Image (tube, grey):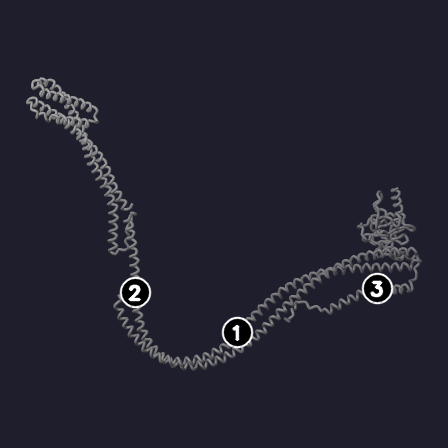
Amino acid sequence: MTRRDPDRPQELDWDTIRGRLSRVRAALEGTIEESVERSRRVMDERARLLAGIPEPARPAEEVMELVTMALGAESYAIETRYVREIARLVDFTPVPGTPAFVIGIMNLRGEIVAIMDLRRFFGVAVRGLTDLSRVVVLGSTRAEFGVLVDEALSVATLRVTDVLEPPDSVAGIGRDYVRGVTANALIILDGAVLLKDARVFVNQAEGGAE
Amino acid sequence: MTVGRKLAVGFGSAVVIVIIMSWIVYSNMTEVVDSAERLAHSIQTRKALRNIYINLLTAETTQRAYLLTGEEHFISSFGTISETIETNLDELASLMADDPEGQIRVRSLRSLVKSRLDRLQRGTDMRREKGLEASLQYVHPEEGERLKDQTRSLIEELLSGQEAVLKGLEAEAAAAARLTFRTITYGTLMALALLGTVGFFISRSITIPVRRLTDGAKLLGAGKLEHQIEIRSKDEIGDLGAAFNRMAGELRTSLQTEREGRAKLEDLLGAIAEASARVTSAAAEILAATTQQASGGQEQAAAVTETVSTVDEVAQTSDQAAQRAKAVSESSQRAVEIGAAGRKAVDSSVAAMGTVKAQTESIAETILTLAEQSQSIGEIITTVNDISEQVNLLALNAAIEASRAGEAGKGFSVVAVEVKALADQSKKATAQIRQILGEIQKGTNSAVMATEEGTKGVNAAIKVVNQAGETIRALAETVAEAAQASAQIAASAGQQAIGMSQIHQAMKNIDQVTNQSLASTRQTERAAQDLNVLAGRLKELLTGYAG
C-alpha cells in the first residue's frame, strides 16, 4: 500500500500552492499601488527626456511634417499644414449624383464635409470599412473635405532632402498628385494639388447638387 | 330365460290346449245332453200318447165286456181308467206346453177322448138301464168307429210328429258326437305335436347346458382346473356354470398357493439342511476359534496394558491441544475486534469520500464563478480598448495641431507623441489580457472537466470502499466463527481429557472382562461340541423330508 504508483502525478504541495496564490494576490494589489509609482516613474522619464537639451532646430525649409496613413497595401503621407484633423468615420450620408469617389457627406462638429475615397480616386485596391478606417480632414484654413483612409498612422518629420523624385511607374496615381517618395516606400501626396483639384470636383459635385 | 320359466311355458301351453279342448268338448256335450233331454221328453210324450191309446182301448174293452156280459165288475175299473186318461192327457199337455201346434192337437185329442169316454159311459148307462139291445143299438159301430179312427189318427199324427223330432234329435246327437270325436282326435294330435315340439326345445335348452356342465364338472373332477365351462345361457344353469368356473378358479389359486407353500417348505427344508451343514462346519470353526480366542485373550490382556499407557500419552496431548485452542480463541477474538475497527474505518472513509465529492463539486462551482468573472473582465477590456483607440486618435490630432502651430507647438507635439505611445501600450496590454483571458477560459474548461472526472473517481472509490467494507464484514464474521469454533475446540479438549481418564478406567474393566471371557470361551467350546452333535441329528431328520 505504501508503494507509490509511478504513473500517478506527484501529490500537490499545498504550501507551494498557497505561496503562489499569496504571491499572485500581492502582485495584483501591487499593480494598483504600483501604478501611481510607475506613472511617476514614467513621468520622471518623460521629464528627463524633456529636460534634455533639445536637438538643434532644423531650418523650416529643411524638414517637412507629415501625417502618414495606410491606403490599401501602401503607405501614404501628406503634409500636416494641409490637414485640419483626423476623425473617426462615425456616420455619413451618401449623396446621389456625385462622382463614384465621393462617398457622401458627414457632420464634423456642425460643419458639413464631403468625403472622398482616395482609393477609388487613385485606383488602389478597395478594402471594406473597418473600425480603423479614418477620415483625414483636409483644408489649409478651414475644413475643405475629408479623405477616407484605411488607417491613420502617425505624425512624422522628414528631411526634404530625403524626399526623392517619384519614379514614372508609381502605381495608378496621377503623377501630378505625388510630391515624392522616400526610401522606405512612403508616397508623399501633394496637398496643394489635391486640395485644388478636389475643391474643383467637390464644387462641381456641389454645383451638380445645386 | 330361466328354466322355471321355460317349464312354465311348456306346461302353460299344455294347459291352454287342454282348456281349449275341454271347452269344445264341454260345449258339444252340453249340446248332446240337451238333445238327450229333448229325446227323453219326446219318449215321454210318446209314452203318454201310447198310454192314452192303451187306456182308451182298455176302457173300450171293459165297456164292451160289460156290454156283452152285463157284469158290473168289468166296469168297476172304468172310472179309474178315465181318471188315468185324464192324468195322461194333463201330462201330455204339460209335455207339449212349448209346442203351440201340439197344444191345439192335444186340446182336440182331449175333446175327442172326452166325447169317446162320454159315449162309452152312455153306452154303459144304456146297458144298465135299457138292456143289451138298446145299448147295442146305441153302440153303433159306425159312430164308435169314426171316433175311434179319429182318435187313432190324431194319436198317430202326434206320434209321427214326435218321430220326426226324434229323428232330428238323433241326427243332431250324431253330429255332435262326430264333432266331439273329431275335436278330441285332432286336438289330441295337435296338442301332442305342439307339446312334443315345446318339450323337445325345453329339454334341449336344459339338457345341453347340463351336459356341458357335467362334462366340465367331470374335467374339473379329473383335475383339469384350467378348464372353463362355456356359458351361453343366462339361466340357473348358466349361474351354476359360472359358480363352477369360480370354484375352479378358487381351487386353482388355492392349489397354486399350496404349491407355492410346498415349494417354500421345500426351500425352507433345503435351507435348514444347508444351515445344519453350515452349523456343523461353523461349530468346527467355533471350536478352532475358541482356541484362538483363548490365546487371543492373553494377547488382549497385554494389549490392554499398552493401551493404558497410550491413553495416558493421549491425555497429555489433548491437554496441550486444549491450551492451543484457547490461545487460538483469544487471537480470534482480537481478530474480530480488528475486523470491527476495519469496518468503522471503512464507514468513516465512505463519509470522507462524500465530503470530498461535495468539496469537488463546490470547486467546480467556484471555477464556474471565476469563468463568469473573467467574462466581465473581458467586457471591461473592450471598453479599455475603445478608450485607448480614442486616445490614440486624440494624440494624432494633437500632433497635427502641434505641427500646424509650427515652432510654438514643438513641446506639445512631444506630449502628443507620448500620449500616442501610451495609447498604443494600453492597446497592446488589452490584447495581452484578452489572450490571457482565453487561456483562463481553456484552463477553466479543463479544470471543470477534471473536477467532473474527480467526482466520478470519488464515486468509484466509494463503491470500492463499500465492497472493501463488505469484505471486511465477511472476514469479521468468518473470524468470529473461527473464534467460536476454537472455543468449542478448547471446551471439547477439556471433555476429551475427562474422556481419556474414563477410557483409562474402562481399559482396567476390559482387563477383568478379558479374564472372564477366557473362562467363558471354554464354556463356548463345550457348547460348540454339543451344537455339532445337534446339527448331525438335524441332518438325519431332514434326509427323510428332502424329496
Residue A154, located in which quarter of the rendered image?
A: bottom right
Quarter that holds the N terminus of chain B: top left
Label 1, residues with CA under 10 Å away: few <14, some 14-19, many ≥20: some
The residues tagged by marks 2 and 3 sit, at their Cα atoms, a distance apart of 135 Å
Name the residue at 46% across, 79% down.
B502
Q: Can the viewer see residue B74 in this picture?
A: yes
Disc assigned to residue A51: none
Q: CA distance from mark 3 to mark 1?
A: 85 Å
Q: At label 3, which amino acid type do we have?
A: Ser
Whether residue A121 is visible to the viewer of this picture, yes or no, is no
Toward the viewer: B211 or B370? B211
Left/right of residue A22 with respect to residue B301 in the rendered view:
right
| Image-quadrant location for residue A44 | bottom right
Which residue has dot 3 on it?
A35
Amino acid type, mark 1: Gln
**Both labels 1 and 2 in a single chain:** yes
Q: Secondary structure at mark 2?
A: helix
Please provide percent x and percent y for residue A131.
81, 53
Discs 2/3, front = 2
The residue where tag 1 is placed is B488
Q: Is B453 displayed left or right of B283 in the figure?
A: right
Q: Callout 1: residue from which chain?
A: B
Of the residues shown, which amino acid type is indicated by label 2?
Answer: Leu
Q: Residues within 10 Å of mark 2 (few under 14, many from 20)?
A: few
Chain of residue at mark 3:
A
Q: Nearer the viewer, residue A95 or B167?
A: B167
Residue B265's disc is 2
Determine whether label 3 and label 1 are within 8 Å by CB.
Answer: no
Q: CA distance from mark 1 to mark 2?
A: 60 Å
Q: Is there one chain holding both mark 3 and mark 1?
A: no
